[in-house]
Amino acid sequence: MEYKYQTQGDAMMGPQPTQYGSGSQPAVIPPGASQWMVRPAALEGVPPGLEYLTQLDQILIHQQVELFEAFTGIETKNRYAIKNSLGQQCYFAYEESDLCMRLCCGNMRGFQMHIVDNTGKEVIRAYRDFRCCVGCCWCISGETCAFIVPVESPTGVPIGRIIQLCSAWKPKYAIQNERNETILIIQGPCCVWSGPCCPQDVPFEIKTADESQTIGRLARQYAGLAKEWFTDATNFGINFPMNLDVKAKALLLSATFLIDMMFFEKKNNDNN
């Protein structure tokens, strides 16, 4: 995947995309505003591009508002700016999915999430296959009817996966390493509703594998009345220990997109 930069005088416009594959659409990084986080030096044992995460204990994820979607109600591909606690952008994420899937399957659709650094190089890829048999979080039996999101960094090199778990009432996910060993658990609240009539954050606790200790939090943040009323664009914040393994941080970042898709996207193209 390659990106073209504008001249230095236009640097604030960000990277300008080219086609990244035969028959694929360009990944548009929106103009504006961001201050870039300085890329750290390469580190032994850290996948290329994940060096940013070694310096972070908090990540802010801001979904971009799509005007076409807001005016027409037609679901478009999601795009997210990923920033540190100072508001400096370290990554940009964009969805790759089929139009028919978005129109007909809504938040159940299959997708790939590409996460690129500030040079436009893909550093993380997460993907979810469409599964017509997936039911409610309390109805899932085993992995056959659960959503599973494998994660790669760099592309083609598995670093783990996110698995939707069976749970009586609360959303629950296992974060597994490349050996399919559970290293963390994400557990949500009984009610994940948040919107213009219910202005509140929705917290998901990050726990150790045995669930004996909470080590962080992933929260869907209330975005304000106008944004909540007219769009389904969401903001998230993730907190975790600074010394958490960098691959685990990348998996938690990827889990955010699954949670956003399952609970805060339109269920179909007719309702919010």
Image (cartoon, grey):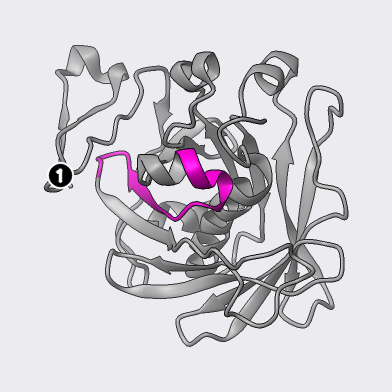
Q: Quick check: is 221 in the magenta stretch? A: no
Evaluate whether residue 58 shows in this view.
no
Q: Position of residue 200 (x, y in %)?
A: 84, 33
- Residue interval drawn in magenta: 103-120
Q: Please give the name of the residue rendered at 30% of the width and 64% of the height, measured from the top-left corner.
A: 154
Of all residues shown, which one is farthest toward the left?
22
Q: Compare residues 171 and 116 and report the one nearer the observer.
A: 171
Q: Position of residue 173 (x, y in %)?
A: 68, 68
Residue under label 1, please give it. Answer: 23
Q: Please give the name of the residue rendered at 30% of the width and 30% of the height, measured from the top-left corner.
A: 28
Q: Compare residues 204 and 39 and report the one nearer the observer.
A: 204
Q: Position of residue 110 (x, y in %)?
A: 45, 55
* Label 1 secondary element: loop
For the C terminus, which image quadrant? top right
Q: In this picture, is 156 found above or below 110?
A: below
- Kindly indicate the quadrant of the structure image that contains residue 70: top right
